[in-house]
Amino acid sequence: MSEELEEVKKELPPEKSETELLKEGLEETKNRYLRALADFDNYKKRAQIEREQFVQFANESLITDILPILDGFGRAMEAAKKIKAGEEMMKGLALIKKQLEDVLMKHGILEIEALGMPYDPNIHEAILQKEHAGPEGVIIEEMQKGYTLHGRVIRPSMVIVSLPAGQTGKNK
């Protein structure tokens, strides 16, 4: 029986000393610490990105409230041209509109190009299609300008898109 016991003992892994067990425990604790440190570093990076995005887009609702005012200046200038308003009034309106555009641009607002561009549903909102001699799917009229804030669309351009001649216009 003792021979059998000796054979079984040979098959078992050798017993580890207390020092070896402590070294293994220390290594495992060190690995857990390094993983926790890496997780914390990733958390800090994510939090920094979220803070930056919050700052970039914090004024979005204020800016979307200001955009109709900019539209109003454009309409006022068109109306002033139609009634042949004085040159000083036209210059004044143009100056105020330009100042407002410059302030918005300084804060990351860019106008979306539309007229003559291919229709893109990500940045344009088609409100109508009209027959047109040119190619299909090209923007032929812009009813309302669209804008982006740091690359994110905050107001799509409202546009009229071309149809090949011979087809009737329809709402989208």
Image (cartoon, rainbow, N blue to C red):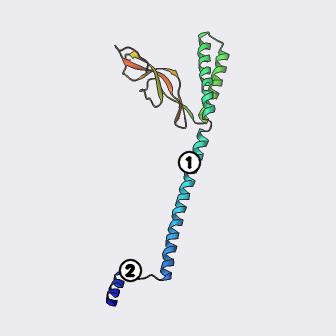
Which is more toward the observer, 50 or 147?
A: 50
Q: Is residue 5 left or right of residue 66?
A: left
For badge 2, the amino acid type reads Pro
107 shown above or below 166? below
* Residue beneath the point at 60% across and 42% down: 54
* Residue beneath the point at 62% across and 38% down: 58
Can you identify the residue that label 1 sits on? 49
Which is more toward the observer, 58 or 90?
A: 58
For badge 1, the amino acid type reads Ile
Distance from disc 1 to disc 2, alpha carbons, whole Å, reads: 50 Å
**Among the 4 quarters of the image, the one containing residue 43:** bottom right
How far across and down, in percent of the image, does residue 12 sit? 37, 81
* Residue beneath the point at 42% across and 26% down: 119
Is label 1 in a helix, a strand or a loop? helix
Can you identify the residue that label 2 sits on? 13
44 shown above or below 23? above
Q: Is residue 74 left or right of residue 4?
A: right
Q: Quadrant of the N terminus?
A: bottom left
Q: Earlier in the sequence, mark 1 or mark 2?
A: 2
How far across and down, in percent of the image, does residue 111 sit? 53, 29
Q: Which label is found at residue 140?
A: none
How far across and down, in percent of the image, does residue 141 sit? 47, 19
> Residue at the bottom extreme?
2
How far across and down, in percent of the image, does residue 16 sit? 45, 81
Q: Quadrant of the C terminus?
A: top left
Q: Is residue 166 left or right of residue 72?
A: left
Which is more toward the observer, 13 or 46?
A: 13
Is label 2 in a helix, a strand or a loop? loop
The number of discs equals 2
